[in-house]
Image: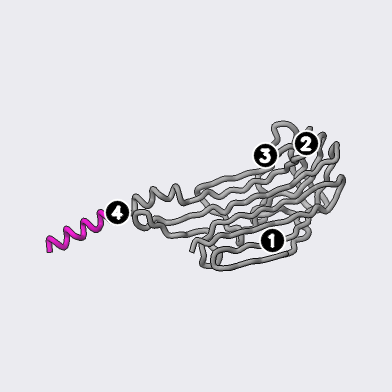
Amino acid sequence: MRRKNVILVIFFLIFFIGFEFSDMTLAFINLPSSYTYYVTSFDKKLPKNVTLIVPTCSLNGDIAEIKPLREGNISLLDTQYGKMIKIEAEEVGHITITSFISSEKTIDIINENITLSPILERELLSKTENKKELSMVYRVKIPVYAEFEGNSTIYVTLHVESGFKALPFFFTFTIPWEPRYGWKPYAGHKYLEVKITKKGWQLAEGEERVRLIFAV
């Protein structure tokens, strides 16, 4: 009986140490979730004296908090399409409208509605799914207003990373946990980019790409 208790104690210690060790490894396995909404121009001669009206970043129907520019002005504006974001700046190189990063939560790209709003058209172009991954490509159109000096191209971009969580099990073993597509845990991203080349009010066209990599 005493021998049995000793064996149980040893097993418990091994399991407890293994659990703690595997918990330490999660820092290298778990990935933070994030999203960034920004406007960019890559032209050698950047657009100057810029006024843009672009969609908001919408999180399950709520508008994400916007960040003021260091130089210029950024604000919410009522338009015929609903709430949109107005940006006024002397120059557009790379302007971050809003961003978020967290190691505490994951983002379910499929079931949580993190997108630009309004999107007036969203058409599925392709979908590929197998045991390892899911990829989808959409054509999107958004209303924008643009005034700027020069013949430039401005990109409106939303980039979302799902993040990834695993549970510690034993030594270096972990159990994939979230987010999930059906029963499959995954790490994935959404990349939505629209190109502005004209001035005035317009329907700017672009693509939304979604890719999930399954952990099982």
Marks 2 and 1, how far apart in space? 30 Å
In front here: 182 or 194? 194
Q: First in sequence: mark 2 or mark 3? A: 2
Spot occupied by residue 215 in the image (x, y as percentages of width and height): 50, 61
The reply to whether the magenta stretch includes residue 97 is: no
Q: Secondary structure at mark 4?
A: helix
Read off the residue under disc 2. 44
Position of residue 167 in the picture relative to residue 4 (left or right): right
Residue that appears at 51% across and 67% down = 183
Q: Along the polypeptide, which appears first: circle 3 or circle 1? A: 3
Count neighbours of disc 2 (C-alpha within 10 A) and say few if under 14, some if 14 to 19, many if 20 or more.
few
Amino acid type shown at disc 3: Lys
| Nearer the observer, 131 or 159 | 131
**Which amino acid type is marked by label 4?**
Phe
Is label 4 in contact with label 3 (beta carbons under 8 Å)? no
For label 3, count other residues whose C-alpha is less than 10 Å away and answer few (under 14), some (14-19) or many (20+).
some
In space, the residues marked 2 and 3 are separated at their CA atoms by: 26 Å
Label whose residue precedes the other's in the sequence (2 or 1): 2
Q: Answer yes or no: is residue 83 visible.
A: no
**Mark 1, residue position:** 137
Q: Amino acid at mark 1?
A: Val
On screen, residue 92 above or below 183:
above
The boundaries of the magenta stretch are: 1-16
User: Mark 4 = which residue?
Assistant: 16
Q: Secondary structure at mark 3?
A: loop
Give the camera-side residue of 133 and 71: 133
Specify the principal SS of the magenta part. helix
How far apart marks 4 and 1 lie (CA) works out to 45 Å
Residue at left offset 71%, top offset 39%: 95
In the rendered image, residue 13 lying in the magenta stretch gets the answer: yes
Which label's residue is closer to the chain start, 4 or 3? Answer: 4
